[in-house]
Image (tube, grey):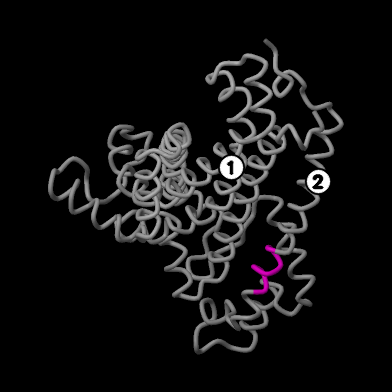
Amino acid sequence: MSDRTFSNPQPAWRVVTALARILAISVPVFLFATLITFLLRALSGITPLAFVAGEDATPELIARIEQKWGLKEPILVQYLHWLSAIFHGDLGVSWKDSQSVSEMLWQKAPVSLSITFFALIIAVVLGTVLGLSAALNRGTWIDRGITAVTSVVSAVPSFVVGILLIAVFAVGFRLFPSGGYVPFDQNPSAWLARITLPASALSLDTVADIARQLRTGLVGAYQSNYVTGARLRGLTEGEIMRTQVLRNGVGPALTVLGMKFPILLGGAVITESIFHLPGYGIFTASAAQQGDVPVVQGALIFSIILVLVFNLLVNAILNRLKPAAQRGI
């Protein structure tokens, strides 16, 4: 039996309208975020003079440095030049090392992104399994047990979980290394072994939130009128779950996933320090302590772009899975 929830795809104009709406929000957010990021230098009062000129700089040298970095131009003009460079893939030059920030971050990014996206996979898989189990067994001891466990897990900070995982699985059972990083292209199995514990520590809070929100969304979908109608039409419980409940109840979990991605990305900084991983989080924290503003700005822009792209994907999926009642069917 066909089901209108699945067999009535959105017209092309609705997809275009949805994408236009998403971009209309994302572009101003990106511009505002880049402006605030750029103003960090002005607000900090730090300039490249201290790095390049030193304490005994002559006025001529200072003038050349200011000319090179455009420090005498109006702040808005400096921002527009910087923004134009970003669109060309240029995140600036490190004041401390005189190296390309883009290249430096590109070298560090695989570590942080490996942890973040593996944590995301763990969170989606475990959160979905737990949320489905709780919803399918709603009102039973399984449901209550999963709710209790996820509530406890979400209250434990990731760095505490990381220390416990090292103590149990690295020191106690010696199943995983306690730290360090091996690139995927050198040794895939060693790469996986070294990111498993940090990704697991980072993912648990997101696992708990996805499980809770998925359980809430699915239980709410089960109580909807269209599920009652599907039962009256003779659909089995499996068909109802697949064609009605999942599609209409997954929205809250996807929304939480979109909100959690920046937290996962930011949490990688603490996780990297615990597991001695040379990611761009630790690299950026070190640059901030040294006052290397272009590196900090470049890392923030890199993170902003990742978060916006990820949320664009989540919003596109949410629009495709929009509940039947909102599609007018």
**Does residue 36 show up magenta in the picture?**
yes
Q: Residue at x 41, y 54 (%)?
A: 279
**Does residue 46 show up magenta in the picture?**
no
Q: Residue at x 77, y 21 (%)?
A: 8
Give, as a single range, the part of the protein colored magenta. 33-39
Quarter of the picture containing the C terminus is: top right
Q: Which residue is mark 1?
A: 254
* Closer to the camera in the image, 262 or 230: 230
Badge 1, how many Cα within 10 Å: few under 14, some, many 20+? many
Residue 229 vs 40, above or below: the answer is: above
Q: Majority secondary structure of the magenta segment?
A: helix
Q: Residue furthest left?
A: 172
Residue 213 vs 329, above or below: the answer is: below
Amino acid found under the numbered disc labelled 1: Leu
Q: Where's residue 55, x and y in %?
A: 50, 88
Q: Where's residue 176, x and y in %?
A: 22, 42
Q: Nearer the viewer, mark 2 or mark 1?
A: 1
Amino acid found under the numbered disc labelled 2: Arg
Q: Residue at x 62, y 83 (%)?
A: 62
As measured in the structure, the alpha-carbon distance from the residue carrying label 2 to the one carrying label 1 is 18 Å
Q: Quadrant of residue 222?
A: top right
Q: Residue furthest front?
A: 232
Mark 2 / mark 1, whichever is N-terminal: 2
Q: Which residue is mark 2?
A: 21
Q: Secondary structure at mark 1?
A: helix
* Closer to the camera in the image, 136 or 168: 136
Q: Where's residue 121, x and y in %?
A: 45, 38
Quarter of the picture containing the N terminus is: top right
* Closer to the camera in the image, 73 or 207: 207
